[in-house]
Amino acid sequence: MHPTTLYQEFIMEHQTPDRRVQQRCAKDVSMTCSHLNKNDEHIVTIRNYNKNGLYFESNEALLIDSFIVLRAVGAHEMENFGPRPEYPFQFSIEISDPEACRGYRSHAVAKVIRCEKVDTDPTRFGVGAKLLILSE
């Protein structure tokens, strides 16, 4: 079974009431991440997002309060990056997706608000970020 399907089934089975004001889009999307004004791009996997923020997983830890740039990555670019997700996840939208999924942006600037090791994989970090600037 595809990892995205397993992740979505896990989320459905283990959902608790969501106290967030904004609805989230739980969709795996591969993007590049770099610090603002630096050339240190690496591949991350966006796990969910809404119009105010996002959660992603990375092989690299990020400092709290640092500013990052997230950018959609084309399949042809994946070979330019070192370690990457087992499967690159391209963005797609389905009619059945929640409205929050339509808020996806191919470029964004965000501020890191949390960074913790992922329980299931101690070599990966879960990062929460607040979206600051979105391109139209």
Image (tube, rainbow, N blue to C red):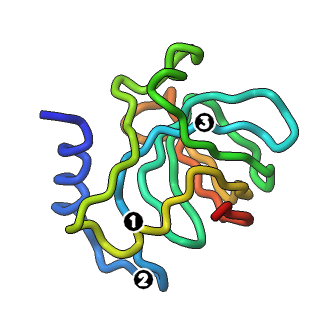
Q: Residue at x 80, y 28 (%)?
A: 39
Left/right of residue 87 with respect to residue 48 in the rendered view: left
From this view, report whether residue 19 is shown above or below residue 16. Answer: below
Query: At label 3, which amino acid type do we have?
Result: Thr
From this view, report whether residue 104 is shown above or below residue 22. Answer: above
Query: At label 2, which amino acid type do we have?
Result: Arg
- Quadrant of the drawing holding the C terminus: bottom right
Marked residue nearer the N-terminal end (1 or 3):
3
Residue 98, position as x, y percentages in the image: 31, 72
Query: At label 1, which amino acid type do we have?
Result: Cys
Residue 22, position as x, y percentages in the image: 47, 80
Residue hosting label 3: 32
SS label for mark 3 = strand
Residue 128: quadrant of the picture:
bottom right
Most extreme residue toward the left, as rendered? 1
Residue 38, position as x, y percentages in the image: 84, 33
Q: Residue at x 28, y 73 (%)?
A: 16
SS label for mark 1 = helix
Marked residue nearer the N-terminal end (2 or 1):
2
Residue hosting label 1: 101
Residue 12, position as x, y percentages in the image: 19, 62
Distance between the alpha carbons at the discs numbered 2 and 1? 18 Å
Nearest to the eye among marks 3 and 2: give it: 3
Q: Which mark is residue 62?
A: none
